[in-house]
Amino acid sequence: MRETPTWRIPAGIIGLFVFLIAYGVIIARYAPDIIGGWPGWAQTVIYLVLGLIWLLPLRRFLIWMETGRWSPPAEPGPDAS
């Protein structure tokens, strides 16, 4: 458990905010040109996927913000006390 403040949390929040804005601008700028002529159902599927895809790296990013490592800490074994 973290007892002292760390720079990673505010830096991570700012970084995540900047990334999401950039990602949204890129999608809003280029996706309509690419999929604008597709059927509505196909556009819906693509926008749903693009709207959820940014969540994939989020777990490791939040772990880094909290621990400073990109992977989760090892779980203690059943015989650890």
Image: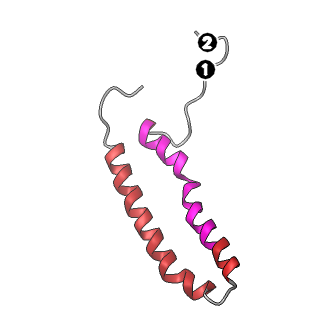
The residue that mark 1 highlights is: 76
- Give the secondary structure at mark 1: loop
Q: Calculate the distance from the C-alpha at mark 1 to the C-alpha at mark 2.
A: 6 Å
Q: Which amino acid type corresponds to the residue marked 1 in the rendered image?
A: Pro
In the rendered image, residue 66, in percent from the top left (x then y), is placed at 43, 38
In the rendered image, residue 74, in percent from the top left (x then y), is placed at 59, 28
Q: Is residue 42 magenta?
A: no
Please tell me how crowded label 2 is: few (under 14), some (14-19), or many (20+) other residues with Cα within 10 Å: few
Q: Is residue 55 magenta?
A: yes
CB of mark 1 within 8 Å of CB of mark 2? Answer: yes
Residue 35 against residue 15 in the figure, above or below: below
Which residue: 64% across, 74% down?
44
In the rendered image, residue 62, in percent from the top left (x then y), is placed at 47, 44
Q: Which amino acid type corresponds to the residue marked 2 in the rendered image?
A: Ala
* Quadrant holding the N terminus: top left
- Give the secondary structure at mark 2: loop
Which stretch did the figure color magenta? 46-66
Residue 43 against residue 11 in the figure, above or below: below
- Determine the main secondary structure of the stretch shown in magenta: helix
The circle on residue 31 is: none
Which residue: 58% across, 9% down?
81
In the rendered image, residue 7, in percent from the top left (x then y), is placed at 31, 43
Q: Quadrant of residue 55?
A: bottom right
Which residue: 41% across, 56% down?
16
**Total marks drawn?**
2
Relative side of 19 to 78, left or right: left
The residue that mark 2 highlights is: 80
Q: Quadrant of residue 46?
A: bottom right
